Image (cartoon, grey):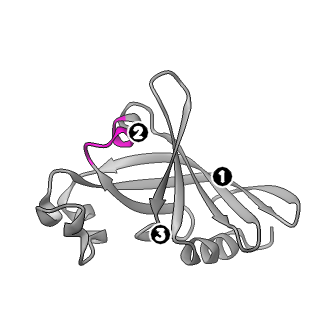
Amino acid sequence: MRDAEKTVGNMIDKLKTAFIGSIDSEGFPNMKAMLQPRKREGIKTIYLTTNTSSMRVAQYRENNHACIYFCDTRFFRGVMLRGTMEVLTDPASKEMIWQEGDTMYYPEGVTDPDYCVLKFTAISGRFYSNFKSESFAVE
């Protein structure tokens, strides 16, 4: 792939859904659909919101290995990013990606103890398009 950061980054920005993967206590992969990321730094670091009380947060705290998959159904292409997921609960991280309307999910606002940030850090990826797959490193 000529420019993974540009190609994948543009794809991430256009899609409304991200699928995140975690590992459960029995070692099985678990997937979940999420709203699109709130912020990204290239394709290396991606931020999402979720409930601190969620099963996914408990899984990431036990085993931080993770993946994110983005699927563009219009052109039948996708990308999986593989890396680690951190659960951030500090005020600066929570404020960084808070958006108006989030009280719908977190009634107590940005300080809601059930609101946290998932910070995904990619190490590698695999892109599928035109009946071909290609692995790449994330710098």
Where's the N terminus, which quadrant?
bottom right
Identify the residue at image location x=80%, y=72%: 2
Where's the C terminus, which quadrant?
bottom right
**Residue 53 to residue 18: above or below:** above
The numbered mark at residue 17 is none
Identify the residue at image location x=14%, y=57%: 112
Identify the residue at image location x=66%, y=70%: 8
Q: Earlier in the sequence, mark 3 or mark 2?
A: 3
Q: Earlier in the sequence, mark 3 or mark 1?
A: 3
Q: Residue lying furthest top in this view?
A: 26
Alpha carbon distance from label 3 to label 2: 19 Å
Mark 3–mark 2 contact, CB under 8 Å? no
The amino acid on which the numbered mark 2 sits, given as a three-letter code, is: Tyr
Picture quadrant where residue 47 is located: bottom left
Q: Badge 1, how many Cα within 10 Å: few under 14, some, many 20+? A: some
Picture quadrant where residue 5 is located: bottom right
The amino acid on which the numbered mark 3 sits, given as a three-letter code, is: Arg
Judged from the image, the secondary structure of the residue bearing numbered disc 3 is strand
Question: The magenta stretch spans which residues?
Answer: 52-58
**Residue tagged by mark 2?**
60
**Residue tagged by mark 3?**
40
Picture quadrant where residue 119 is located: bottom left
Mark closer to the observer (3, 2)? 2
Alpha carbon distance from label 1 to label 2: 18 Å
Judged from the image, the secondary structure of the residue bearing numbered disc 2 is helix
- On screen, residue 49 versus residue 42, left or right, reads left
**Residue tagged by mark 1?**
124
Q: Per the image, is 54 magenta?
A: yes
Q: Per the image, is 25 magenta?
A: no
- Pinpoint residue 127: horizontal percent, then vertical percent: 75, 60
